[in-house]
């Protein structure tokens, strides 16, 4: 299972990287979304999969490691906040600049 | 923390209160709130005189970073106390003077006094710390506050230039000094000055001894404006005059001298120490006095004069180091140089401080400092004129003022060099008295220029911006006090000889069981020194009178000082080079940066995997696979890859959602109910958010070039492969046992919960959660601001 | 964006309460079974989003006249306040306490200061989600 997951994670990272390298702001945002999915799965896989029952006392011991889960829960919510921020940034940038092409957005020329 | 520590940091504490006082009492000059502190500190430090005049010291320690051996150890000995008294005493006078100099309605007094107090505290810290790291910290603080004070009138371009110049040069020296301090630490294993001094004999032959010596000296030379680093001091004159009087004549520039004096017991045995300090000192003395003569700005003359006087004190300290090479300290024949250094340090603070204040008064009352426009002010400002006479005559070394005494001692010290037979001084030593004498002639000339060009001669009212009149009494008090000191010390030098000078000397050249005893005499008999002084006066008067005839000598030198030009071009070149270098890789395309990041990611991780032999593929402990799970994995893979190829926005959102929902199914399979729930709900909200925002965004376009796509594909495949390998190795290498056991055991006992994940979030690792929701809140506020604030900005644009 | 979708609106009226009740349940149950402030908050905001979809922005803000930014602040205060409260009892920041109390109707109830902390999380999550959606929505 872990080996299968390792490849799934690899594919998620690959697609995310490809999307983030593209010129369209939209695709970059979708890319970050995929990247966070990949990272979450990576954390979970590192801890070992299916090692026990759900980490709720009262279930049968042994339990699955609760720490990666707690980490991921935090990460999910944070990545939601970041994605939302990013989306609004893209939306506002498009409104102001009239483009979502990263090449045309670069601003060093005027700021020197 | 003792009262002594409190005294050192009290200026910082007051600096916090100053802006409040400024806001609350706008009608009262903020200086009045500041003035009590230096007076109080001065009287506090006076109380230490009873201890130090016995050539003893007081040490109070306060633990700061004990693991690194850094303690805030405050040590009051003769040398430290002398400086502390100068800092607080002159500080009080300068604050008083500034109250009348700076207009409370025109200037931003709060910032001025905050900077001044910062400086005062930093300077006290420098001279009273026994720990080198603490000393260094305060040292940089003085550079920093000096920068702020020089740039106080920051709307003037010259102020900014001067501030930057002083900052660059002194901080450069400071960093080198830090290097020296670290070298000393490597040799001795301690940052404490007293302990380093105790080990000075052992480190003498150490390989790092000479580099440490050079580094420390570089710090001292830059701070004390020694040739060729003196170029920052004249530009620092852009600061308000009280600042020049305080920082750039009496205190900060003497920090370098303090450092040399303080480190003398460590390094003085080395011939390099003597030659470098004495050599640079005497060169600075000559060059400073020579350059001062051609200046036309009162403050520029004073600046070069300060440079030259600093060189003089420096050279005396260098020569004084020779005394350590002779068995008997009692023989004052060689210690006289050190005595002269300390004595002149005090005298210079008194007469130069008063002269700066006089220059400030002239500037304030006439509107100019250009001696070509000034003249004949004697009748309008008789008191200022008297003060100027006292100050300049003392500077020129004329009796009966204190400058005469120290100048005589200076000559004595230099003449004694001829009798030394160490370090090749018998061959090249004759240069010292010669240069000293020539420099003194120039000192005499510029002193005369300063006073006579300003106060006598033809009065030119049409050149002046204001109608000159005598300064208000408040402005005169401080220079009057200083000028009286000039006279009092001139007539009764022995009141300070055994209270201030000898204790300081004991700290510079400590000898076990020996008590220094200094007596200063007016009359030495017909010694070479006397004839040197007479020669200076005769030739000085002659040259001063004939100045217009030989002034053209200065035209032989390039118009602009070569050193300044070198500094400017260096600055320009380094600025341009760093700009070009940055432009090479910071091209403004976010994709380029991402390519850097991802390539580094691939290279660094691949290298680590290879070098550490970390890649491991172990299938012994893998979990079972159900065919449904393979199906889910395929769904994720297919969905994420097809996002790359779709054209429609809607499809890509739906595909992203599909990945998210499948991930939450995986969470179910992997026994993570909390995660599954959260992921499910978040995915729903995210998708609606995407839909909302995408509604406004343009259609997806396809990337144009094939090469572009190929690079992207290459990098992304690399990242994917590396991450896969890491995931595999991370599973196969179990280096530490899991810490999960603790949580399993304690969830109910400690937190009375049964859902471990939730208990970890709210209880065991509550801090994480707290900051996490803070981050969320910030993100929401950011979004809110991005959308709402624009409305107002948009209106503004319409108005344009 | 005026919609006139009677089926959605009617269904929302029923489902809304179910979701909100469920979210409150999940919030309180979080200490023992899956759930907690995050999920609870997200579910509640999901319910409000549903309301937004069924009706329009104005109607919803009439029904729920809440300033969501204030809600974030209150939530953060709850979380930090619960943590800081521990300092009053001379224990480290964020130490929680718990105990069993006999309440009139509910009977023997386990009370826990972690719930207050989680309530802070709940409020922040609802506040943040709704701030985001509301501001984007209002901008149309």
Image (cartoon, rainbow, N blue to C red):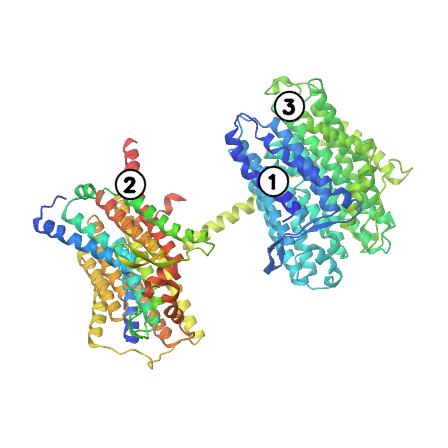
Classed neighbour count for the residue bearing mark 3: other residues with Cα under 10 Å, few (<14), some (14–19), many (≥20) = some
Check the image and name the residue furthest to the right.
Answer: B525
**Residue B663: x %, y % from top left:** 25, 66
Q: Which mark is residue B11?
A: 1
Which one is in front in this view, the residue at disc 3 or the one at disc 1? 1
Question: Residue B703's spot in the image, x, y percent?
Answer: 24, 58
| Chain identifier of the residue bearing label 1 in the image | B
The Cα–Cα distance between marks 3 and 1, rounded to whole angstroms, is: 40 Å
Q: Secondary structure at mark 2?
A: helix
Q: In the structure shown, which secondary structural element does the residue marked by tag 1 occupy?
A: helix
Of badges 2 and 3, the one in the foreground is: 2
- Share a chain, discs 2 and 1? yes
Q: How many marks?
A: 3
Q: Are marks 3 and 1 in contact (CB under 8 Å)?
A: no
User: In what element is the residue under mark 3?
Assistant: loop
**What's the distance in space between the residues labelled 2 and 1, CA to CA?**
44 Å
**B125 is higher (above) or lower (below) than B101:** below
Which mark identifies residue B788? Answer: 2
Residue drawn 77% across and 45% down?
B51
Q: Earlier in the sequence, mark 2 or mark 1?
A: 1
* Residue plotted at (46% across, 56% down): C91
Which one is nearer the viewer's eye here, B745 or B775?
A: B745
Q: Position of residue B422 (x, y in %)?
A: 83, 55
Of residues B112 and B465, the one drawn nearer to the viewer in this rendering: B112
Within the image, what quadrant is residue B187 found in?
bottom right
The quadrant of the picture occupied by the C terminus of chain B is top left
Q: Horizontally, is B245 left or right of C15 in the view?
A: right
Residue B36 image point, x, y percent: 64, 33
Which residue lies under the disc numbered 3?
B373
Q: Are marks 2 and 3 in contact (CB under 8 Å)?
A: no
Report the side of B707 relative to B279 (left or right).
Answer: left
């Amino acid at each position: 299972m872990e080996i299968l997951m390792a490849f799934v994670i690899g594919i998620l990272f690959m697609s995310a990287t490809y999307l983030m390298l593209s010129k369209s702001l939209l695709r970059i945002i979708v890319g970050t979304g995929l990247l966070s999915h990949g990272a979450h799965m990576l954390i979970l896989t590192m801890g070992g999969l299916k090692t026990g029952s759900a980490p709720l006392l009262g279930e049968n011991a042994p339990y699955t490691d609760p720490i990666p889960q707690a980490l991921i829960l935090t990460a999910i919510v944070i990545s939601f906040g970041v994605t939302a921020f990013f989306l609004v940034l893209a939306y506002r940038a498009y409104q102001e600049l009239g483009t979502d092409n990263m090449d045309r957005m670069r601003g060093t020329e005027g700021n020197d | 923390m003792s009262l002594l520590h409190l005294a050192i940091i009290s200026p910082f504490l007051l600096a916090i209160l100053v802006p409040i006082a400024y806001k609350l009492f706008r009608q009262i000059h903020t200086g009045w709130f500041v003035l009590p502190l230096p007076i109080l500190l001065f009287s506090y430090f006076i109380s230490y005189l009873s201890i130090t005049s016995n050539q003893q010291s007081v040490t109070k320690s306060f633990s700061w970073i004990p693991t690194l051996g850094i303690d805030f150890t405050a040590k009051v000995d003769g040398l430290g106390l002398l400086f502390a008294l100068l800092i607080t005493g002159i500080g009080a006078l300068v604050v008083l003077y500034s109250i009348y100099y700076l207009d409370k309605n025109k200037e931003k007094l709060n910032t001025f006094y905050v900077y001044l107090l910062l400086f005062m505290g930093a300077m006290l810290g420098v001279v009273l710390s026994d720990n080198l790291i603490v000393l260094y910290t305060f040292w940089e603080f003085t550079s920093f506050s000096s920068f702020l004070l020089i740039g106080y009138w920051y709307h003037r371009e010259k102020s900014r230039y001067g501030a930057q110049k002083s900052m660059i040069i002194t901080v450069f020296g400071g960093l080198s000094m830090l290097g020296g301090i670290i070298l000393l630490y490597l040799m001795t294993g301690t940052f404490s000055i007293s302990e380093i001094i105790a080990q000075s004999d052992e480190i003498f032959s150490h390989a790092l001894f000479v580099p440490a010596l050079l580094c420390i000296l570089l710090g001292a030379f830059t701070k004390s404006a020694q040739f060729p680093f003196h170029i920052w001091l004249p530009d620092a004159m852009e600061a308000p005059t009280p600042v020049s009087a305080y920082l750039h004549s009496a205190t900060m520039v003497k920090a370098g001298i303090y450092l040399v004096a303080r480190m003398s017991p460590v390094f003085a045995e080395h011939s390099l120490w003597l030659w470098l300090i004495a050599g640079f000192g005497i060169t600075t003395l000559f060059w400073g006095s020579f350059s001062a003569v051609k200046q036309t700005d009162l403050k520029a003359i004073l600046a070069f004069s300060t440079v030259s006087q600093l060189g003089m004190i420096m050279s005396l300290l260098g020569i004084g180091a020779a005394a350590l090479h002779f068995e008997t300290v009692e023989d004052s024949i060689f210690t006289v140089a050190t005595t002269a250094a300390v004595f002149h340090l005090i005298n210079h603070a008194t007469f130069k401080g008063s002269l700066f204040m006089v220059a400030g008064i002239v500037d304030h009352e006439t509107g100019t400092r250009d001696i070509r426009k000034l003249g004949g002010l004697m009748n309008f400002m008789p008191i200022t004129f008297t003060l100027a006479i006292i100050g300049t005559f003392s500077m020129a070394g004329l009796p009966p003022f204190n400058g005469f005494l120290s100048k005589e001692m200076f000559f004595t010290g230099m003449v004694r060099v001829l009798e030394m037979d160490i370090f090749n001084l018998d061959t090249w030593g004759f240069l010292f008295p010669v240069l000293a004498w020539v420099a003194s002639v120039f000192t005499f000339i510029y002193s005369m220029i300063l006073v006579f060009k300003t106060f006598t001669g033809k009065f030119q009212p049409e050149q002046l911006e204001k109608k000159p009149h005598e300064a208000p009494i408040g402005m005169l008090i401080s220079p009057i006090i200083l000028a009286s000191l000039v006279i009092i010390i001139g007539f009764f030098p022995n009141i300070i000889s055994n209270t201030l000078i000898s204790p300081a000397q004991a700290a510079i050249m400590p000898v076990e069981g020996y008590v220094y005893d200094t007596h200063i005499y007016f009359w030495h008999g017909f010694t070479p020194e006397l004839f040197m002084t007479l020669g200076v006066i005769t030739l000085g008067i002659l040259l001063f009178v004939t100045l217009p005839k030989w002034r053209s000598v200065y035209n032989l030198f390039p118009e602009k000082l070569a050193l300044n030009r070198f500094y400017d071009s260096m600055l320009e070149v380094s600025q341009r080079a760093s700009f070009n270098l940055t432009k090479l890789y910071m091209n403004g395309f976010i994709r380029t940066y991402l390519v850097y990041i991802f390539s580094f990611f691939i290279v660094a991780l691949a290298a680590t995997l290879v070098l550490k032999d970390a890649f491991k593929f172990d299938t012994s402990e893998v979990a079972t696979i159900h065919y449904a799970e393979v199906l889910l994995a395929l769904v994720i893979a297919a969905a994420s890859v097809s996002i790359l190829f779709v054209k429609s926005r809607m499809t890509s959102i739906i595909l992203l959602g599909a990945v998210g929902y499948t991930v939450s199914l995986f969470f179910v399979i992997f026994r993570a109910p909390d995660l599954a729930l959260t992921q499910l709900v978040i995915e729903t909200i995210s998708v609606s958010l995407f839909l909302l925002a995408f509604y406004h965004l343009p259609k997806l376009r396809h990337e144009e070039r094939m090469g572009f796509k190929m690079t992207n594909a290459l990098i992304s495949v690399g990242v994917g492969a590396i991450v896969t390998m890491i995931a595999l190795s991370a599973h196969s290498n179990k280096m530490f046992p899991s810490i999960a056991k603790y949580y399993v055991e304690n969830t109910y006992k400690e937190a009375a919960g049964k859902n471990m994940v939730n208990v970890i979030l709210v209880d065991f690792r509550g801090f994480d959660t707290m900051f996490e929701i803070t981050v969320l809140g910030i993100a929401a506020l950011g979004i809110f601001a991005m959308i709402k604030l624009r409305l107002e900005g948009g209106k503004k644009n319409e108005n344009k | 964006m005026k919609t006139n979708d009677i089926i959605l609106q009617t269904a929302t009226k029923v489902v809304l309460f179910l979701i909100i009740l469920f979210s409150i349940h999940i919030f309180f149950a979080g200490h023992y079974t899956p759930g907690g402030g995050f999920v609870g908050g997200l579910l509640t905001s999901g319910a409000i989003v549903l309301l937004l979809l069924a009706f329009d922005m104005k109607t919803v803000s009439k029904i729920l006249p809440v300033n969501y930014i204030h809600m974030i602040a209150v939530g953060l205060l709850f979380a930090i306040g619960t943590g800081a409260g521990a300092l009053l009892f001379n224990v480290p920041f964020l130490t929680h306490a718990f105990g069993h109390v006999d309440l009139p109707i509910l009977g023997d109830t386990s009370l826990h200061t972690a719930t207050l902390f989680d309530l802070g999380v709940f409020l922040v999550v609802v506040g943040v989600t709704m701030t985001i959606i509301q501001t984007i929505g209002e901008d149309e």
